[in-house]
Amino acid sequence: MTTTIKSAVTSGAVPRVGMVSLGCPKALVDSERIVTQLRAEGYAISSDYAGADLVVVNTCGFIDAAIDESLEAIGEALQENGRVIVTGCLGAKGDIVRRTHPKVLAVTGPHAAAEVMDAVHAHLPKVHDPFMDLVPPGGIKLTPRHYAYLKIAEGCNHRCTFCIIPSMRGDLVSRPIGEVMQEAEALVQAGVKELLVISQDTSAYGVDIKYRTGFWRGRPIKTRMTELTRALGELGVWVRLHYVYPYPHVDEVIPLMAEGKLLPYLDVPFQHASPRLLRLMKRPASTEDTLARLRRWRTICPELTVRSTFIVGFPGEAEEDFNRLLDFIDEAQLDRIGCFAYSAVDGAVANALPDPVPEEIKQERRARFMAKQETISRARLARKVGRTLTVLVDKIDRGTAIGRSSADAPEIDGVVYVQNAANVAVGEFHEVTVERADVHDLQSDEGAERFRQAAPERDDLVKLSHLVRQRELLDLLGQRKMRAHVAEVGCRRDLR
């Protein structure tokens, strides 16, 4: 209410904003931009509801479970604080937010930082203070200081029948390549050791602007995934590709992985293996071509890790279709897989398809699918026993270092546990010898004297917050339960 605003301004206190961020890494980047702009304008960021004069909730609206959690988070913020601005994908789904929570101050859609700031200005005005406006060169990040997501585009041109992302985020809009590279350089200068490249369709980068030529470091460079990844490979940090649609030109980045310019890791959402089901989904339908490409990729880059996601129980899926999917993962031998039972998303074209699969059959198929993949995963990880891997340390827990190899993306893949790892720093590269493996993770018993640093220490230009709170996440993709990092800047986030 106005009383709260008056109190913050007249007392001389700096207005404080809390941030609740839900959803995928793309939404997380939106939250980071909002927090960065808030800090740039002199607002302080509160780590709890009680200390905030206003709370921004960045929502997810992809499936019913995400909608329910977003509405719950809005209700919690209203109850604990009372002054709430809502943004994100749920805001694009009609008036559901206003109908459920009429007391919110404002509602915007996704990637709407300017509209969010307009709402903040209207409900919590702040006098400019140059001493409070200083922000790190890489912006305010909600991830640990040693890795960051780099979003290269918004929206998607595909019309997959199970997905409503284009209706919420619009068609593909690629960021200028010079702008992307400047952000990447700033992050590396700020101490980031791993860049995770994300968008709704990473391999379509530049299609919307016909691969227009931009400039970086004074030289021309095409707005295209291959050229972008080649440039990112010059920065001397880990570069990991997510959400890669299997276009033919994806083949061009595999040699860069073999040369060590990029991490040998591809996140490619295949979704199914039955040509009939893939056509109903409006996805590429040639399983034979996919298997042949996987073989070629692994010939060029034997260390390649492939992650994918699949849907079981899609409308019309017969037992024959499902068995074809099981045969595919048997032959493909993918390293990391997420699987979820089809959920009818409000507004998705697939909802109108005939022959819906009963819920009990969906869950039974998902269980069979994951049981088969666990066998594959266990066998593939067992091959790493006895090998020495470079690991980026994410956390130290009572003398045990918890890190990730090139095969492990943060929060969605496995980890490497290293026992007796005293005097090891979070955010540094080290080499360890793998001694045991299970379904998801690797373990080493190496002590500190054998825990060798694998990369030179960087000067830290910025000190960002470490993990101060954890929250159990929804297991929407059939992966192991993950935990979200919540930075001291006051952000809570869920990764889907």
Image (cartoon, rainbow, N blue to C red):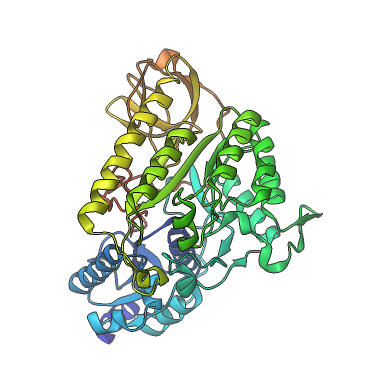
Query: Where is residue 382, by image quadrant?
Result: top left
Q: Nearer the viewer, residue 372 or 387?
A: 372
The residue lying at 36 percent from left, 73 percent from top is: 352
Residue 137: in sight, yes or no? Answer: yes
Where in the figure is residue 425, as x and y percent of width and height? 43, 30
The residue lying at 33 percent from left, 56 percent from top is: 494
Q: Nearer the viewer, residue 131 or 453?
A: 453
Query: Where is residue 79, by image quadrant?
Result: bottom left
Query: Where is residue 15, by image quadrant?
Result: bottom left
Count all numbered tags in the image, as a single digit.
Answer: 0
Where in the figure is residue 138, as x and y percent of width and height? 55, 54
Q: Residue furthest front?
A: 320
The answer to whether 249 appears left or right of 336 in the picture is right
| The N terminus sits in image quarter | bottom left
**Where 278 sits versus 74, above or below?**
above
Q: Nearer the viewer, residue 95 or 461?
A: 95
**Where 204 sits versus 68, above or below?**
above
The answer to whether 17 appears left or right of 31 in the picture is left
Q: Residue furthest right?
A: 219
The residue lying at 42 percent from left, 38 percent from top is: 327
Where in the figure is residue 481, as x and y percent of width and height? 28, 44
**Where 31 sits versus 225, above or below?**
below
| The C terminus sits in image quarter | bottom left
Residue 477: in sight, yes or no? Answer: no
Where in the figure is residue 254, as x and y percent of width and height? 65, 38
Q: Nearer the viewer, residue 62 or 47?
A: 62
**Where 482 sits versus 46, above or below?**
above
The residue lying at 37 percent from left, 78 percent from top is: 93
